[in-house]
Structures are given as C-alpha cells and as structure tokens.
Amino acid sequence: MQTCLVSFMVWNLALEDEKFLVYFKKSFIISITIAGIYGVFLMKMGGVNPYTSMLSDYFGKDDMALRFSRMEGRLDFSNASKIQSTMAHPMTWTLILSFSIIILLAVYSKSNSIIYWFLIALIGFNILISGVRTGIAASVIGFIYFLVRERNIKLILFTLIAVISFAVVVQSNESLSNLFKSFTDLGDQKSDVSGSSITMRSNQLHGVLNEIKGNELVGKGYGWTSYYLSLNGKHPVILAFESLIFMVLCNSGFIGLLVWLIFFVLLFLVNRKILTFKIDIVLMDTFIIVYAAYATGTGEYGYMPFFAVFYSFLLGYLFKNEKSQIHKIQNSLTNFNKGYINFELSNK
C-alpha cells in the first residue's frame, strides 16, 4: 500500500509540477554519481564499508559489510567479494545500478550530452565489481532487447566494437574470464566461481515442484517462503528461494504465476497507452524486462518499491518530454501555416 502511494505521488507530481522532474533528475544523477565513485573506492577495502557500518551501528542493525569482509573476492583487481556502496545489500545496490543505466539512456536520448556515457560507464563498472552476477545478466538481457527493438545501426556498430574490445580484455584476465564462463557453466566445471549455477537452478525448480505437489494451482499460501525461512532457515533444496518464479510458485502456485504474468503484460500496455514515440516505449519496456530478469535471477526481496518509484518517474519524465516535443512541432506547423497564408495574401 505504501509503495502504491509513493509511486502515485511521484507520477502526479511529475505531471503537475515541472520543477519536480528537474529536481528528481538532478538529485538522482548526483546521488548515483557519488554512490558509484564510492563503490569504486570500496574495491580496495576488502569488504569493509565505513558508511553502511556507521549507519548500522547508529540504528542497531546487523552490519552486512562484516559478512562480506570475510569472503574472498572474485576479481583479481578488487579485493572485495561483494560491494553494496550506500545501500543495505549488494543485490539492492546492483538493481539500482541496472535501473540507473536505463534512466541515464533515457535522459541522454533527450539531451545528447556525452557526460551521460561516462556515467553509464561508471555504473557498468560498478555492476561488474558488485559481486552480483545477476546484475550483469539482467542488464545484458535488457540491452539486447533495446538493440533489437530500436534497430539503431550506429548503436549496434558501437556495441559490437565495445563487445569485441571487452572480450579481448576478458580473455586476457583470468578472473574476468572465470566470471563470465560461470554464466554458461552447465556442469559446474568451466568455472570455479562460487554461487548459483544453471544446474543448481534446475535442481531448485524440481524442489519447488516437489514442495507444492498437490497444491500446484494455489501453492502453500501467502508469504509461505518468508515463514519457512524464519522458522527453518534455508530449504535443503530450494535454499533461500532465490527467484521470483520459485517464490510465486511456492506462495501462490500457477495461478500466482499467471497473475504476475498479467501484471507485466499490463505494464507493457500502459507504456503504449501513455507514450507515443517508439524509443520511449522501448526504454520503458526495457526497464520492465530488467526488473523481471533481475527478480527471476535473485528473488523478490523488497525490490518492488524501488521499481515502482523509478518506473513512475521514468514514465512521467518521458511523457512530459513527449508533450513538450509535440507542442513544439504543433507551434512550428502553426507558424509555418501563418507564414504561408501571409505570403499568399501578399502576392495577391
């Protein structure tokens, strides 16, 4: 309910107050820049995070950074296993980074300022060093969709050059090569990177289907996964239910899965109902796809509020820019028609 209220407020402020969008955009860019630079700084801190540790100590919360400081890093140029920057958890931080790339692409499409590409590069590097591979996968899936739908030849060529250059860098660095091999490690033999694998996810899915056997349609009840974790800790097969699909199936069965599917379809329809320009619709679709891919890869651990707020802002930002552009075109046509009429009258 609170999430709906906040996103509703953001949407209405975006429509009614021109300054709100300007302030939101500026504060977002400044915040993500500072957090991104801080994330790079944490590469050499071995998992220690002074900022979040200070806040955890002040509010009497568990310091997540202490857990990460005991874990071994995956990249040889970073001694931090996971980086959370200014957020409570690395997975939340990486989700925000994934959203930020799309928002900055949207802002760039309206201004064409090269500074946004530097910010996108900073965010991309933070996703790489965050220690959360799902962020890389979700961002790549979203960007592939964007390229296919947008069909911008210049952007496709630029992407190919960037991919080839990055592939050369990956091949020359053992830890990077090891990290990216883990994405296609079907038999857990190509890479020694710890964490989720395709085989593991397949076993977890079988565990979910066994768990809801006899209750396939409605699952085991609302919030059952959270209840199970609080009572028993990790499940012997499904572990911490690290996928939106696992959580939905366990909590509400195939009916719940259908409801979530309808929810995403409705969001795609909303994009087409409110927006007119193709690039804006594709950007909003990409935003939804990134969230869906990320939640499918990690689960839904309080990510919806972030999605709702940023979705509302981005939709409002693109909608207001469209209205402004359409208004300018209409004014130009009106002035042209007036000039043409005056020209005709002066020649009579």
Image (cartoon, rainbow, N blue to C red):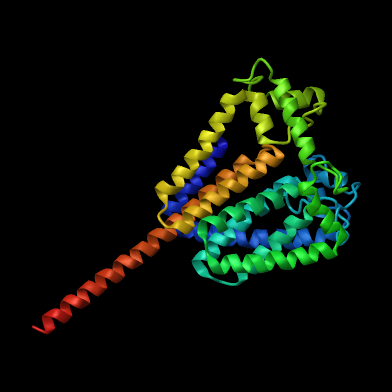
Q: Nearer the viewer, residue 39 or 175?
A: 175
Front residue of 170 and 273: 170
**Would residue 30 be visible to someone looking at this image?**
yes
Residue 193 vs residue 334, the one in the foreground: 193
Number of dots carrying numbers: 0
Q: Position of residue 186 (x, y in %)?
A: 79, 42
Query: Farthest residue toward the top?
Result: 214
Residue 295 point in image, percent of width and height: 66, 40
Residue at 51%, 34% in the rendered image:
262
Q: Is residue 286 left or right of residue 275?
A: right
Q: Is residue 279 above or below residue 196?
A: below
Residue 204: quadrant of the picture: top right
Question: Looking at the image, which residue is at 85% across and 63% down?
Answer: 173
Residue 1 percent across, percent down from the top left: 55, 33
| Residue beneath the point at 80% across and 40% down | 60
Vertical placement of residue 175 versus 158, above or below: above
Q: Residue furthest bottom?
A: 347
Q: Quadrant of the C terminus?
A: bottom left
In the image, is 15 to the left or to the right of 339?
right
Residue 310 visible? no
Q: Position of residue 285 (x, y in %)?
A: 52, 49
Q: In the displayed structure, would residue 200 be above or below residue 272?
A: above
Left or right: residue 157 versus residue 17 is right
134 shown above or below 44: above
